[in-house]
Amino acid sequence: MHMTTLKQLLIAFLLLAQCSLSAQAWVQKASLPFTAFGRHHPVTFTINGYGYVLGGTSSQLAYLSDFYRYDPVANTWETLPSFPGPPRSYSYAVVYEGKAYMGFGFGPTSDMSDMWEFDPETNIWTEKSLCPGDGRGHPAYVEVNGKIYVGLGGSSMGNLNDFWEYDIATDLWAQIPDFPSHKRHHPFYFSVNDMVYAGFGHGNTDVGGSTIYNNLYRYDPVIKEWERMDDFPAEPRVAGTQFSLNGKGYVLSGEGQDHYYLEEGEFWEYEPNLDSWTQLPSVPGSGRWAPGSFVIGNTAYFTCGTALLSNGLEANQRDLWAYEFEGGSISTNSPQMLAIDVYPNPTQGVLFVRDEQNAAFQYQLFSADGRLVQSGSYQPSTGILLNKMPTGVYELRCTFEDAIRVAKFMKQ
């Protein structure tokens, strides 16, 4: 082989390796607006391809109510009207059928047990019914099939281990079996395959020389029973952030068994079918106390929290980091890909899907060069809004139970 050709192949291989590595590394994005305080315990969630950050605690104010929206395509933040309820921290939110549901936390009214619904189409918050259980901060807080599961957490009465189920459709609460282990606050949690997972956290009972835990439990909402899973294989931890994606759970950053910063912002992936953990690339810098995270498409975003700086000082952060998972929304274990019909095509601003079931589903939009440019929950009544999309050819991927359905269309 000619030496020039060999050199060209070597350069191409190195470039390919670099691209492969860069796709699996954390990339810094635009920080929260300069008018926003650095904070810990922000409320974070995703709706219709946008990330949201609300409230938390800063060094300037104990409880915040400011509200921001992140556009991943433009890599910019927009300041939204402040949350109209009590300012808060140590609170969480989930999303169901295009609306966010936020509740609990600490604020001027101490331990809160409220629930609020946010409609992004109108920017209106509506208060729902109060949980009959104790008010609490930093609980486990997950959604499964239109129901929100809230439990554990800390209150003026100490750590808790009770659990509650909130039915979004009926606005009613019901108590479910208690968490079958030590009471604790600031656990890690996520939902995968219609199951609730909760564990880790900080309790009162010393286990193995620490009150920070590494055990994990799974709750089955159908049979209403808890089951202990294998213990987390690394250092016990508390006060990080978490999310689920593509049938797996993820825990990110936090503090270790001494309730001090982890040396790195560790990132771990949980495979429920194997009940096993795999470590992924850490977020740059030390572990953080009480950061937030949200997922847009196949990219995870990490923000805020209190970090240990290189000079030994602590500071609340307002930065944003992104981690793109390999393979886009389609993996080797995904359902088959089939065609689907969309209209109007070409379209100028709104796209609809012809679907006999006329049901809501999750979607992703990809540009002609393969970039994820928008994602969200499709609603038959409103379609997919494309007003901010530039002219061009796009691919729509619709996620159904039996298949990924795909269509090409043109935006004029």
Image: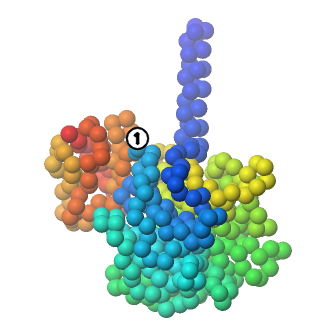
Q: Secondary structure at mark 1?
A: loop
Residue nearest the viewer, comparing 69 with 409: 69
Image location of residue 377, percent across then percent down: 33, 61
| View extreme (right): residue | 209
Q: Is residue 359 left or right of residue 25?
A: left
Image location of residue 65, percent across then percent down: 49, 69
Residue 190 sits in which quadrant?
bottom right
Going 80% across and 74% down the picture, which residue do you hit?
A: 210
Going 57% across and 38% down the picture, which residue do you hit?
A: 22
**On screen, residue 320 above or below 162:** above
Residue nearest the viewer, comparing 333 with 53: 53
Going 65% across and 58% down the picture, which residue do you hit?
A: 316
**On screen, residue 96 above or below 355:** below
| Number of marks | 1
Residue nearest the viewer, comparing 291 with 266: 291
Q: Is residue 347 left or right of residue 206?
A: left
Q: Pick the quarter of the image with the C terminus.
A: top left
| View extreme (left): residue | 344
Residue 260 sits in which quadrant?
bottom right
Q: Is residue 269 visible?
A: no
Crowd band around label 1 with a 10 angstrom C-alpha radius: few (<14), some (14–19), many (20+)? few
Q: Is residue 204 left or right of residue 14?
A: right
Image location of residue 157, percent across then percent down: 66, 89
Residue nearest the viewer, comparing 61 with 335: 61
Q: Pick the quarter of the image with the N terminus.
A: top right
- Residue under numbered circle 1: 371
Q: Is residue 353 visible?
A: yes
Residue 347 sits in which quadrant?
top left
Q: Amino acid at mark 1?
A: Arg
Going 35% across and 44% down the picture, which residue do you hit?
A: 366
Image location of residue 195, percent across then percent down: 50, 73
